[in-house]
Image (cartoon, grey):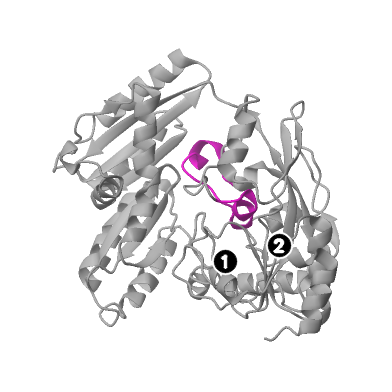
């Protein structure tokens, strides 16, 4: 669509000329994110500084029926923050303040553009902990994390973003501002609009303030690395650890391709890893009693010895822990260097991961692709990357059918399409394979209640 010069002037008058971008070279940056999705360039980018500005912009968009897409750091993997109809992109980066830290009640109120890791580091200085830690935590904004219900390695023990959001200030498409809940640990007052907003990918409202629950920061953590001669055996070991009565703070799976690619990306020597090793589990325990954590590690060690594994490494220094986590957190960056056809974010019940990996092997043979598997084995959330490699675009056309097969397999195993990345543009065509039409109709009805003119992040999810 075309935005008239009169509308541009109206927006400038409301939020200031400095907060309105129209330079075509700058607008190009807003048509992509970290996904494979391709959007279109917006006609305008706005940079609000506060909730009042957001409200004024939304009122104008509503009156003139201008599509608008909210954007956090642009680290999303499903195209959720790129425009499909041009219109306006609302870049939230200027709303990056800590509004209030309530140490007595273990709460913090922030604006949406706080970088996740900076938030974590700040509360850690107060002895407090915000556990959700997606791989992009060093660059992603907390607002984007809320919009996608992000997770990360420590979700297995502490849960995803949803467990830590108490209340949200939200600007609705017509410009009205609401708080969705209360700053309390319990709330049974009507429908939970807070939970509805979490994971809604900016399709229902624009989040302008977030009240987060915090917990005491663990004083100790221990980390071990277990090399397996079979990736399926590695996933079988995961459930066995939980059955022994231990709940680690993280259990991360890395298959051999993921290990090698990340090693190359970081300039490390592959020869450090036995060629027989086909997968590794990175296992962390944390808490407040070091002796108890050492006992838990001993028990995990006993469990792992029941499997065919190599030498288990115990990280004995903070530097060694950092190096092990650095390898795991850079797998996604290493994958980006290669030509990837599709990134999947499937999640299945933990005990069904070996079955899922068996089915992925069959799909590799059937369709002739390579898959790199890594991710959050502790909660069954595996990131499956289908690699195009040196194959031409024409050769991989039939791989679309492989994605359909994979999604149906995941459903049959009791799983679902996305564990933490969301649906956006990239995954929306597969959503009807997972959800019944009645489910989709209800969701579309909710969208229509909040956004009857369909101006807010249109063509996402559905």
* Residue 270 horizontal/vertical position (percent): 19, 43
Q: Quadrant of the C terminus?
A: bottom right
Question: Is residue 155 placed above or below 454 in the rendered structure?
Answer: above
The residue depicted at 83 percent of the width and 48 percent of the height is: 189
* Residue 154 horizontal/vertical position (percent): 49, 39
The reply, left or right, for residue 291 in relation to residue 191 is left
* Residue 456 horizontal/vertical position (percent): 70, 71
Q: Does residue 239 appear anywhere in the picture?
A: no
Q: Residue furthest top?
A: 291
Q: Which structural element holds mark 1?
A: loop
Q: Which mark is residue 133?
A: none
Q: Which structural element holds mark 2?
A: loop
Question: Is residue 443 placed above or below 352 in the rendered structure?
Answer: below
Circle count: 2
User: Which quarter of the picture shows residue 233?
Assistant: top left
Q: Tag 2: Cα neighbours inside 10 Å, few (<14), some, or many (≥20)?
A: many
Q: Tag 1: Cα neighbours inside 10 Å, few (<14), some, or many (≥20)?
A: many
Q: Does residue 251 appear anywhere in the picture?
A: yes
The residue depicted at 65 percent of the width and 71 percent of the height is: 457
Nearer to the camera, 172 or 242: 172
Nearer to the camera, 99 or 417: 99
Q: Is residue 141 magenta?
A: yes
The reply, left or right, for residue 226 in relation to residue 216 is left
- What span is in magenta? 140-160
Q: Which residue is mark 2?
A: 47
User: Which quarter of the picture shows residue 88?
Assistant: bottom right
Mark 2 touches mark 1? (CB < 8 Å): no
* Residue 22 horizontal/vertical position (percent): 66, 74
Nearer to the camera, 369 or 171: 171
Q: Which residue is mark 1?
A: 80
User: Which quarter of the picture shows residue 41?
Assistant: bottom right
């Amino acid at each position: 669509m075309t935005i008239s010069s009169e509308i541009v002037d109206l927006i400038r008058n409301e939020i200031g000329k400095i907060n309105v971008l129209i330079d075509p070279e700058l607008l190009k940056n807003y048509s992509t994110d970290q996904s494979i999705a391709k959007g279109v360039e917006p006609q305008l980018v706005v940079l609000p500084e506060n909730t009042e500005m957001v409200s004024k912009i939304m009122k104008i968009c509503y009156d003139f029926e201008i599509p608008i897409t909210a954007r956090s750091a642009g680290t999303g993997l499903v195209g959720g923050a790129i425009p499909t109809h041009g219109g306006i992109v609302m870049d939230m980066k200027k709303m990056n303040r800590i509004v209030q830290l309530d140490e007595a009640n273990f709460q913090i109120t922030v604006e949406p553009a706080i970088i996740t890791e900076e938030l974590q580091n700040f509360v850690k200085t107060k002895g407090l902990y915000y556990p959700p830690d997606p791989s992009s935590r060093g660059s992603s904004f907390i607002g984007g994390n809320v919009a996608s219900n992000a997770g990360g390695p420590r979700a297995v023990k502490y849960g995803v973003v949803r467990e830590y959001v108490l209340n949200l200030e939200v600007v609705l498409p017509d410009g009205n501002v609401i708080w969705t809940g209360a700053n309390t640990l319990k709330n049974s007052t009507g429908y939970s609009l807070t939970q509805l907003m979490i994971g809604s990918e900016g399709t229902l409202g624009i989040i302008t303030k977030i009240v987060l629950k915090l917990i005491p920061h663990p004083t100790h953590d221990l980390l071990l690395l277990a090399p397996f001669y079979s990736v399926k055996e590695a996933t079988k070991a995961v459930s066995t650890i939980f059955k022994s009565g231990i709940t680690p703070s993280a259990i991360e799976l890395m298959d051999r391709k993921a290990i090698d690619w990340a090693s190359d990306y970081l300039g490390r020597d592959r020869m450090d890893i036995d060629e027989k090793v086909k997968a590794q589990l990175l296992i962390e325990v944390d808490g407040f009693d070091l002796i108890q954590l050492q006992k838990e590690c001993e028990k995990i060690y006993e469990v792992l010895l029941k499997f065919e594994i190599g030498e288990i490494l115990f990280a004995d220094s903070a530097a060694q822990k950092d190096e092990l986590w650095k390898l795991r957190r850079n797998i996604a960056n290493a994958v980006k260097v290669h030509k990837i056809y599709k990134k999947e974010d499937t999640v299945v019940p933990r005990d069904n991961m070996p079955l899922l990996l068996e089915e992925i092997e069959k799909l590799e043979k059937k369709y002739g692709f390579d898959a790199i598997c890594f991710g959050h084995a502790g909660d069954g959330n595996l990131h499956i990357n289908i690699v195009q490699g040196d194959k031409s675009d024409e050769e991989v056309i039939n791989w679309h059918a492989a994605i359909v097969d994979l999604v149906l397999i995941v459903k049959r195993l009791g799983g679902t399409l996305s564990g933490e990345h969301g649906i956006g543009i990239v995954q929306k065509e597969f959503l009807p394979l997972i959800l019944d039409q009645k489910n989709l109709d209800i969701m579309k009805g909710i969208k229509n209640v909040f956004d009857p003119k369909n101006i807010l992040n249109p063509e996402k999810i559905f």
